Image (cartoon, rainbow, N blue to C red):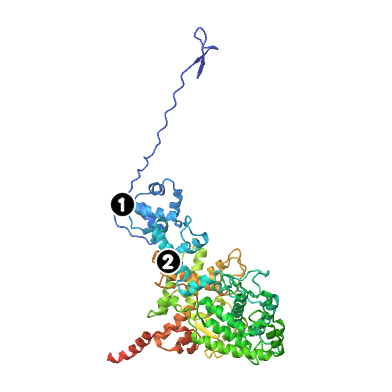
Amino acid sequence: MYKFIGADGDIDGAVQALPPAPEPAPKKKRGPKPKPIVEFPQAVHGPWIDPPGFAEALALHMRRHGDSPEHLLKAVTLPDAGTCQKTIRKWTNERSAPESVESFALLGRIERRYQLPPGYFRAKLAANARAPRGSRIPGISPAEQRRIAWHLPADFRRRPKREREEILAWVRSVIIAGSTDYRAFQRESGKHRFALRFPEAGIRKSARIERGVGRSPATSEPSDRDAPADLQRDVAAFIRFKTATLPPPHLLRNGRWGSETAAQKLEHLGLMFGALTAKADGPVEGRAIPRDSLSFAMLLFPAVWDWYLGWREARRGFYTSWEINMLDFAMAMARPDTGYFRQNPHLAATLRPIEGLISEADIVDAASDWDALCTRCHIYTAGRKKDVQSVARVHRDPFEPILPILEADSPVGEYRKITEEILARMPNAKRQPKAAAESVRAFLMLRFGLHLGLRQKNLRQLRFVPRGQQPMGERQLETLKCGELRWNDKSDGWEVLVPAVAFKNATSSFFSKRPYRLLLPDLGRLYEFIDLYIKCDRALLLGGAEDPGTFFVKSAKRTTANAAYDQLSFYEAWRLAIQRYGIYNPYTGRGAIKGLLPHGPHNVRDVLATHVLKKTGSYEQAGYAIQDSPEIVAKHYGRFFPHDKSALAAGILNIAWED
């Protein structure tokens, strides 16, 4: 600061420096001093009721210990943490809930501060449809981490390395892969795609990855796995012959194929021709036949079948029912009168010589006497079928994934535990509406399967009519070849009606050309969730995708044009529900049944048939549960063990001793 002073002491133009004025003292802040942070604050004494919900419990213990959101955060947050006080405030107001690994770690520190048992708050959280968010797990790709994250415990990253490796190995082996010899074979064979495609046939393949087929491309652009044009043309003509309502007037036919059977046979042909063209020195070890040498008619030559049968045995290690079914197919194609090859001698012109399999002389003989070639093929395949049948083994035990259920006294009651687990872990619909809708869909899938016993095709193609609307007539459903869920005013309940023609075994004596009709029971909250699904959840899952009109629809995504399930996607949806809610996970405590393995919807028919057999001993009544004959139940579905038979008989005999 400066001041002007004159010679006589008066202030004039002279300048004299003055000391700076002292700075004003800071004003003291009013209010109470900041509350000191205590590691274990004293709780307010007195009785208190433990609330069931997470938000209420957190708010209660904060009040008991005198903590505000700001003070609690200071007491439990690490120095470098990015959590803000709004997070805890949102938790107590139920506007959000912990979902990340960091959030669960914060909960653990709050439990320690309030001296609560570990996992106290975590146990009160509503089920979450998403796995805890967090950093990447070293050595695991993002895609695999998404698949396995649901099945890892919350403290996975804090566990010792040995335990983490043990958990990962168990999840990969049991939950993801399935842990059976057949699954191991599927995984290995699915690594190398070799099957040829037949786009001109107009039927989408079932996309069985384990057999080398893979998913069909969404576009119609040519692929390097497409069969040659001539072969595609001939196979497409054959498929039209077998699937048309009426065959051409100049051709005879023994039975008609549905779209599912046609897709399966097309897949089998693709695998056979793919093996014939695969490189001999590659992982598939094929026959290396040039593609332009392939022809449909080459299936009439025994040498071709001998090579393919030997290749199949070497690949799997033994013969199975697959080879028997393929030989049946060849026999039918060469059958007198109705065989497709027998009635199409013009196919001889498509034959090409193949070294070691088909010679020039063979082609000349075929053109001169086509009927004799078909006869030789028919005789050969009939003999080979008997030979293979005598040594064929079962590679895939269809009961293996569900053995813990089939061995229970009440298989249906045991399987029902999975549906109860879904309800117990259903996400909060307010915070995660789509995830909650997917849980409702999974619950209804399993419940419908348990009540109806339908095959996968009939279940996924089931249509529906909301209450108060007019249901379809039986003729309309026969035209569509699918069933319908409708409200029955007379019975005051939900009813399922499926015309007989919609079933794979439509000609079975079970139907006698009459429709299948069943009133669903109003048990276990079934009607409550049917109404909820129709009113809210189904539309939420559809999003903006095209409505296929079926009861079950896929979760719409940006790339979803049609929300209808196909064979593979419906199987995967069922399998996902079993992985999440069915298989007991000892590391997370989730899952309903110990020893269960992933499986699809078809296994529920085994559960129903076995349950009825255990309770009644009647194969006929077991057939009623799954719309099939006693012979088919005994051959394919019923797991009726000798000790079950003895126990059933003993129960009847022991009554005589009670008097």
The picture places residue 186, in percent across and down from the top left corner, at 51, 73
Query: Which residue is drawn at the image coordinates 40% and 87% (left, top)?
Result: 616
482 versus 61 height, above or below: below
Towards the viewer: 119 or 250:
250
**Which residue bears the numbered disc 2?**
170
The picture places residue 63, in percent across and down from the top left corner, at 36, 52
Q: Which numbered disc covers residue 44? A: 1
Query: Which residue is drawn at the image coordinates 40% and 88% (left, top)?
Result: 617
Towards the viewer: 289 or 656:
289
Local SS, label 2: helix
273 versus 101 height, above or below: below
Hey, which quadrant is residue 122 in on the image? bottom left
Local SS, label 1: loop
How packed is label 1: few (under 14 Cα within 10 Å), some, or many (20 or more)?
A: few
Q: Quadrant of the C terminus?
A: bottom left
Towards the viewer: 178 or 279:
279
Q: Amino acid at mark 2?
A: Trp
